[in-house]
């Protein structure tokens, strides 16, 4: 059975309307070009409902929590539907153990029942189940009995919230899935030891959005207009992954340049000097819709991540968004796999000295020819291409299962 004729349920760790870029949503939107996709986001808890019941967002979907007939909501793409789950019990605070697992089973039964009710109502019997990094509910795919169960591993587990139960739950998911798809080579090598049907499909970019930075009608974001040029910019969360040691030295060595870090702060990981340096500018979180205006104002885009065991698993979406906006890119050498996908059009730096040299070289000599090369690399790394790669893998998996 070809995947183009088979509906796909994407069970994501991100909600559809999340302000954060989500790999699962990009995949959903591209798969929905030629097939029916139900996007099932991370469920709301009873606590979420109590705290937010009077918000506009909750009022819009209030009926959906309690009635399966109202659970399916249209999106701007005809084949892509949001499937709203019932409220579940908040349980992540509980210690790992038999009691937690028992309550988790209760929540999973609520989720499975809702999805099954919607499938039955819409006459869907055969479908593909893609768990996109929602390891919090590892048994949902088993309860639904799809044609094939696919687990997409997007990131390493870092936060205490994820680790508390995720180490046990993700191991179950990897073992029990028919196929595992990883977004980095390091994650691929890790999961391959557990499940031989593990594959590597890296992240990509939504060029239709980031390329708006090239449009003459796109204005530089207002938050950048009073910042002195040249602007060395970063767009994303400001948290533990950043290499603050290198950043500190680079910023100090380049007092004539402005360093803009546009994104939300995870304060526990940010050193105090970062907030008190004259040529560092922190506009705060900027909505994803406004990204093109920010990128247009950058002279150089950077990804200064620290090099450690976690970073080797990171395949950042922003890399190809930067390139899709035509911007020169400098990044630390945190993940060697990125060289295979950038074909020499970005600068990889090991320390502050090489980072500064790259900045000055780009500012001195960068033009249309270099920009054209960057755009060409970006075009090779789109979500449309990645979605097709995932489709091909799943189709092979379906054929393999049918021949067993």
Image (cartoon, grey):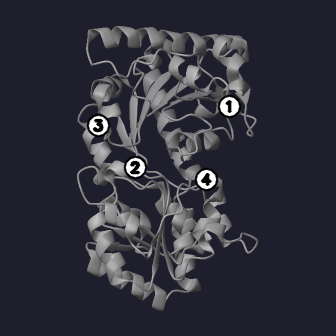
First in residue order: circle 4 vs circle 1: 1
Quarter occupied by residue 358: bottom left
Residue closest to the eye, 321 or 2: 321
- Picture coordinates of residue 343 (x, y %)? 42, 71
Sequence-wise, which precedes: disc 3 or disc 4? 3
Residue for badge 2 = 266
Label 3 vs label 1: CA separation? 37 Å
Q: In this rendering, which labeled residue sits more in front, label 2 or label 4?
A: 2
Q: Earlier in the sequence, mark 3 or mark 2?
A: 3
Q: Which residue matches tag 1?
A: 57
Pointer 3 and pointer 4: residues touching (CB < 8 Å)? no
The Cα–Cα distance between marks 2 and 4, rounded to whole angstroms, is 17 Å
The residue pinned by badge 3 equals 191
| Quadrant (top left, top right, bottom left, bottom right) of the C terminus | top left
Which quadrant holds the N terminus?
top right
Residue in view at x 34 percent, y 85 percent? 357
Residue 95 x %, y %? 27, 19
- Indicate which label's residue lies in the foreground, 3 or 1: 1
Residue shown at 61% from the left, 60% from the top: 291
Q: Which residue is mark 4?
A: 287
> Mark 1 packing: few (<14 Cα in 10 Å), some, or many (20+)?
few
**Which of the 4 image quarters holds residue 271?**
bottom left
- State which tag comes first along the sequence, 2 or 1: 1
Q: Secondary structure at mark 2?
A: loop
Asked if the residue under mark 4 is in contact with the one under mark 2, i.e. CB atoms within 8 Å, the reply is: no
Marks 3/1 in contact by CB < 8 Å: the verdict is: no
């Amino acid at each position: 059975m070809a995947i183009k004729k088979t509906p796909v349920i994407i069970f994501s760790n991100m909600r559809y309307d999340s302000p954060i870029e989500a790999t699962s949503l990009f995949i959903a939107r591209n798969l929905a070009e030629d097939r029916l996709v139900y996007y099932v986001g991370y469920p709301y808890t009873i606590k979420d409902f109590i705290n937010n019941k009077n918000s506009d967002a909750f009022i819009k979907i209030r009926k959906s929590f309690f009635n399966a007939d109202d659970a399916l909501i249209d999106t701007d793409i005809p084949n892509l539907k949001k499937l709203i789950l019932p409220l579940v019990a908040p349980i992540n605070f509980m210690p790992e153990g038999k009691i937690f697992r028992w309550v988790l089973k209760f929540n999973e039964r609520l989720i499975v029942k809702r999805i099954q009710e919607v499938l039955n109502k819409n006459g869907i019997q055969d479908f593909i189940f893609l768990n996109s990094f929602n390891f919090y509910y590892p048994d949902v795919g088993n309860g639904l009995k799809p044609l094939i169960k696919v687990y997409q591993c997007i990131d390493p587990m870092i936060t205490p919230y994820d680790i508390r139960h995720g180490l046990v739950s993700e191991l179950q998911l990897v073992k029990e899935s028919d196929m595992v798809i990883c977004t980095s080579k390091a994650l691929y090598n890790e999961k391959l030891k557990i499940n031989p049907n593990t594959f590597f499909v890296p992240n990509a970019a939504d060029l239709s959005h980031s390329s708006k930075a090239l449009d003459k009608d796109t204005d530089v974001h207002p938050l950048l207009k009073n910042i002195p040029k040249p602007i060395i910019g970063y767009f994303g969360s400001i948290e533990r992954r950043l290499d603050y040691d290198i950043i500190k030295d680079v910023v100090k060595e380049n007092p004539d340049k402005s360093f803009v870090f546009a994104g939300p702060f995870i304060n526990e990981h940010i050193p105090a000097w970062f907030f008190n340096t004259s040529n560092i500018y922190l506009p705060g979180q900027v909505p994803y819709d406004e990204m093109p205006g920010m990128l247009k104002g950058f002279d150089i885009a950077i990804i200064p991540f620290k090099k450690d065991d976690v970073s080797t698993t990171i395949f950042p979406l922003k890399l190809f968004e930067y390139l899709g906006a035509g911007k020169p890119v400098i990044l630390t050498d945190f993940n060697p796999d990125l060289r295979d996908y950038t074909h020499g059009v970005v600068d990889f730096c090991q320390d502050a000295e090489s980072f500064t040299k790259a900045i000055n070289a780009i500012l001195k000599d960068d033009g249309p020819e270099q920009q054209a090369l960057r755009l060409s690399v970006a075009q090779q790394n789109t979500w449309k291409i990645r979605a097709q790669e995932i489709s091909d893998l799943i189709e092979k998996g379906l054929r393999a299962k049918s021949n067993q």
